[in-house]
């Protein structure tokens, strides 16, 4: 990795990172501020009896739902976290395609830095950004719970965010791979967007279809992300960790190999 390129890319994306961090922090505060109101109602009493597809769409599958500050945070924020930050990941990871489209890639390639270091430097900025956003989410939930005089299990919430962070890195790596293949932002965004939307829809459509094709859910990245199960068991899902880490690593390495061999002419 080139430290100079890393710091330069971080400087260029600092305002976007600040905006996302503040927004997610405020979202976490708002989520916890709603907990006392929701706790006083019986709106969640029948969640465990709802159809499997409905539970899958909102991350309630895999464990009996019991309303606690942690489960409420998972339902209202953490289940959506990979989608929200995934959007940020997708737009952040097409940077190399933007460089090609704008013609500024020549300036990068003219520097005495190997191509793979350029990609690693750009990707490292997003990894740092994702970690900061995840930290802001956790701090927001902690501060929000303190404001309503409730306590939360910080370790359990951290475990959910760790898995969510790995999930988001999958989208970032795959988008980077698409960007090195197409070298066009629009095509890269389309491919990544279709993948994310298709994976999400597949996860909750399959349960209402023929049981003989239930195995297709294994192809959905969202199938492995079950925040309620993590909260109930107070432990990470080993399968999810292996799948997300494996896919992210393979996609990232593939992106480097493709970019190393691409004939880039602007």
Image (cartoon, grey):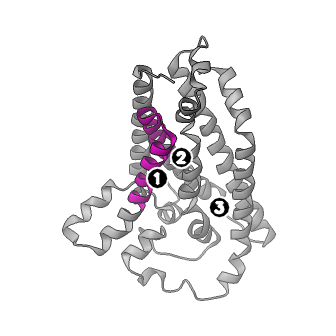
CA separation in Å, label 1 and label 2: 8 Å
Kindly identify the residue that appears in the image at 59 percent across and 52 percent down. 85
Q: Which mark is residue 211?
A: none
Which residue is at the far top? 112
Give the mark nearest the N terminus, 3 or 2. 2
Above-or-below relation of 65 to 196: below
Residue 35 location, x and y as percent? 68, 76
- Label 2 secondary element: helix
CA separation in Å, label 3 and label 1: 34 Å
Residue 100 location, x and y as percent? 53, 29
Query: Label 1, on which residue?
Result: 193
Which residue is at the far front? 266
Decide whether the magenta segment is chiefly helix, strand or loop. helix
Query: Label 3, on which residue?
Result: 153
Region in magenta: 171-200
Query: Label 2, on which residue?
Result: 90
Q: Nearer the viewer, mark 3 or mark 2?
A: 2
Above-or-below relation of 197 to 30: above
Give the mark nearest the N terminus, 3 or 1. 3
CA separation in Å, label 3 and label 2: 31 Å
Which residue is at the far left? 212
Residue 250 location, x and y as percent? 39, 35
Kindly identify the residue that appears in the image at 43 percent across and 45 percent down. 244
Q: Label 2 near label 1: C-beta < 8 Å?
A: yes
- Label 1 secondary element: helix
Kindly identify the residue that appears in the image at 43 percent across and 73 percent down. 55
In the foreground, 68 or 10: 10
Kindly identify the residue that appears in the image at 46 percent across and 53 percent down. 193
Residue 104 within the segment the image draws in magenta: no
């Amino acid at each position: 990795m080139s430290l100079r390129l890393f710091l330069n890319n971080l400087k260029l994306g600092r305002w976007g990172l600040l905006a996302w961090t503040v927004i997610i922090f405020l979202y976490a505060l708002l989520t916890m501020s709603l907990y006392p109101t929701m706790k006083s109602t019986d709106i969640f009493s029948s969640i465990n009896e709802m159809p499997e597809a409905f539970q899958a769409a909102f991350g309630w599958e895999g464990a009996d739902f019991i309303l606690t500050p942690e489960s409420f945070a998972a339902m209202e924020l953490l289940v959506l976290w990979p989608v929200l930050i995934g959007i940020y990941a997708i737009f952040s990871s097409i940077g190399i395609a933007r460089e090609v489209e704008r013609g500024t890639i020549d300036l990068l390639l003219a520097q005495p830095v190997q191509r793979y270091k350029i990609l690693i430097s750009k990707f490292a900025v997003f990894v740092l950004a994702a970690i900061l956003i995840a930290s802001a989410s956790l701090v927001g939930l902690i501060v929000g719970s303190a404001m309503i005089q409730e306590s939360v299990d910080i370790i359990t919430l951290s475990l959910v965010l760790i898995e969510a962070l790995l999930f988001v890195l999958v989208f970032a790596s795959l988008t980077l791979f698409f960007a090195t293949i197409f070298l066009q932002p629009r095509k890269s965004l389309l491919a990544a967007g279709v993948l994310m939307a298709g994976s999400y829809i597949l996860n909750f459509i399959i349960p209402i279809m023929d049981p003989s094709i239930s195995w297709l859910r294994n192809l959905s990245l969202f199938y492995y992300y079950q925040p309620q199960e993590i909260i109930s068991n107070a432990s990470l899902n080993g399968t999810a960790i292996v799948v997300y880490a494996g896919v992210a690593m393979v996609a990232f390495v593939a992106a480097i190999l493709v970019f190393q061999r691409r004939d880039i002419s602007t």
